[in-house]
Amino acid sequence: MKKTILFIFCVLAFTGIGVTAANGQNGRKSVSGTEVTGTFRHRFTGRFKGSSSDIKILALGKNRLHIAMDLIYPYRMRNGELMANTGVLDGKAAIMGDKAVYESKQFGTCKITIKFVQPGTIKVSQEGSDSDCGFGHNVTAAGTYRKISSKKPKFGLPK
């Protein structure tokens, strides 16, 4: 009986430690403007190696970010020619801790969450379809992006 109680206690203690450790990894209290600001790139692999999607981010202060996305969905035509559907986004996101959220109802309900996983790496998730976010067919912001530049990004159309 004592062994059974000890076993149950150990299992509960171990489970509790595991839950605490997992919860501790959910997020950081904040990220610096230096970590946030820059250009991040998601590189495609395999048949589409050399293709990429970019996200530009600028810390504005007061828990606000300016974000711009230049996204693609690469594919091959029947004749083997490389093609891509595209998606662009330019707007403001609110940041709390290590997560930034962009929301829009312009084309449907679109919510894009940017998690600053560690310096130089973001994980992006998207709620809403490609068309809800104003993107081309099969285009999504979701994925892991790596910082390719820490320079303050320029926004808008090239002149």
Image (spheres, grey):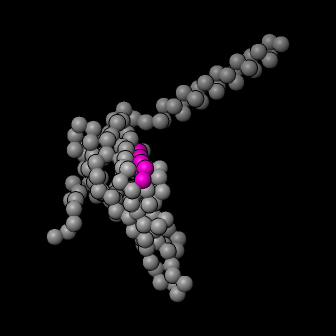
Vertical comparison of 147 with 15: above or below = below
Q: For the point 27% across and 38% down, which residue is it?
A: 63
Q: Position of residue 72 (x, y in %)?
A: 41, 67
- Dominant secondary structure of the residues highlighted in magenta in the image: strand
Q: For the point 47% across and 67% down, which residue is it?
A: 137
The image quadrant where one finds the N terminus is top right
Total numbered badges shown on the rendered structure: 0
Q: For the point 55% across and 84% down, which residue is it?
A: 78
The image quadrant where one finds the C terminus is bottom left
The answer to whether residue 85 is magenta is no
Vertical comparison of 129 with 101: above or below = below
Vertical comparison of 49 with 110: above or below = below
The answer to whether residue 49 is visible is no
| Residue projecting furthest to the bottom | 79
Q: For the point 51% across and 78% down, which residue is it?
A: 76
Would residue 8 appear left or right of 137 to someone viewing this image?
Answer: right
The answer to whether residue 109 is magenta is yes
Q: Position of residue 71 (x, y in %)?
A: 39, 64
Q: Position of residue 53 (x, y in %)?
A: 39, 64
| Residue projecting furthest to the top | 2
Region in magenta = 108-115
In this view of the protein, which residue sits in the foreground, 28 or 127? 127
Would residue 2 appear left or right of 67 to someone viewing this image?
Answer: right
In this view of the protein, which residue sits in the foreground, 142 or 25? 142
Q: Position of residue 113 (x, y in %)?
A: 41, 46
Vertical comparison of 152 with 30: above or below = below
| Residue projecting furthest to the right | 1
The answer to whether residue 87 is visible is yes
